[in-house]
Amino acid sequence: MITNTQINTFEQEGAVTIDTPLTDDQLTQAAQLMDTLLPLGPPRPGEKKPRYRVGENSLLQPSFVSIIANPFFEEVMKKLLYTDNVVITNTAIRKTHPQPNAKFEIGEHTDITYGLADMASKPRRMDLGLFIWIKDVGPKTAPLMYRPKSHLQIAQWMDDRPTYLTKSTDINNYVNMQDTHSRPAGHAKHPDDWPDLEFEDPIPVVGHAGQVSVVNQAAIHGASTNVDTKPRYSFFIGFRPRDVVMGEAKSRFNGRQSYLPKLREVLPPDRHHLIPDDVQ
């Protein structure tokens, strides 16, 4: 189980990696299925190169459900979110294929906007996601990159300058947001949106097969280029405290309402409590 020291590392630095009880058989089955589902993607319109980073959302396959249903991840999220009751928000897999002769690049962004009060409340007014490493991921294998402490820097700045929220935010495209100052709220922000602060340089999140990394989605982070010779395999599970309401895009909200009833049908009965009450 996650330790108090690891929880403190997560809260202060914005990321932590821990061991899990996943078995070699579970990891092997997940990797084989990802190989089948996630070949190189076709080029985007106007481009010639294939898509090296490919994925699938809203997972229902038995090999993936066995991982989603593992009680370990629920218990970790309870600790990190300071609550006795968490629910699943979304799931996804990503495979990043090696990109020959490529330059190492990062697509940095933030996914969610939190204030300091959100990150200090009990339960936390936050969404959190687990990045489960199906195979080893090293500094060259398209690691997730993040800027330590940037979630706290932005939250502090935001508390005094809520206009940060108004940039490129059309309130009509969101639910659970009274106005553009509402938070917590999930919407992507990119370098042009960030406050003018001195952030630490990005560092890689690395791990061994079967480990899991938790990254604060309000921290500046991003996928990177795979300059290794082997693919990167990641499995994402999102959680939030049961009674916490997040502002979010209507498309994401509607997608969750469609997916989670199907997930309930394939979860073991003793795991049905992971599905939110407002899902029919």
Image: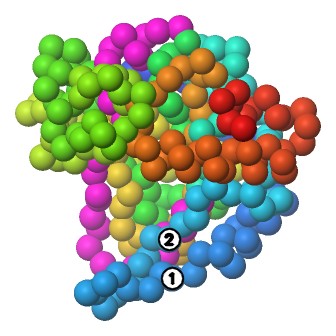
Residue 148, how many percent across, how many down?
32, 33
Magenta residues span 93-122
Confirm whether residue 220 shows in the render. Answer: no
Residue 78, how many percent across, how many down?
66, 21
Element at badge 2?
strand
Mark 1 surroundings within 10 Å by alpha-carbon count, few (fewer than 14), some (14 through 19), many (20 or more)? some
Query: Which mark is on residue 177?
Result: none
Residue type indicated by callout 2? Val
Asked whether residue 61 is drawn in magenta, I would say no
Residue closest to the far bottom = 48
- Residue corresponding to mark 2: 54
Position of 114 relative to 174 (above/below): above
Q: Residue at x 36, y 10 (%)?
A: 117
Quarter holding residue 165: top left
Residue closest to the far left = 196
Quarter holding residue 103: bottom left
Residue 177, how many percent across, how many down?
36, 27
Residue 187, how many percent across, how many down?
34, 41
Q: Residue at x 91, y 37 (%)?
A: 269
Position of 187 relative to 81 (above/below): below
Check contact, mark 1 vs mark 2: CB within 8 A: yes
Most foreground residue, 149 or 244: 244
The quadrant of the rendering that contains the C terminus is top right
- Residue corresponding to mark 1: 40
Quarter holding residue 70: top right
Indicate which disc, 1 or 2, sits on the residue closer to the N terminus.
1
Asked whether residue 114 is drawn in magenta, I would say yes
User: What is the distance, in whole Å, between disc 1 and disc 2 at their CAs?
Assistant: 7 Å
Position of 136 relative to 254 (above/below): below
Q: Is residue 180 left or right of residue 24?
A: left
Element at badge 1?
loop
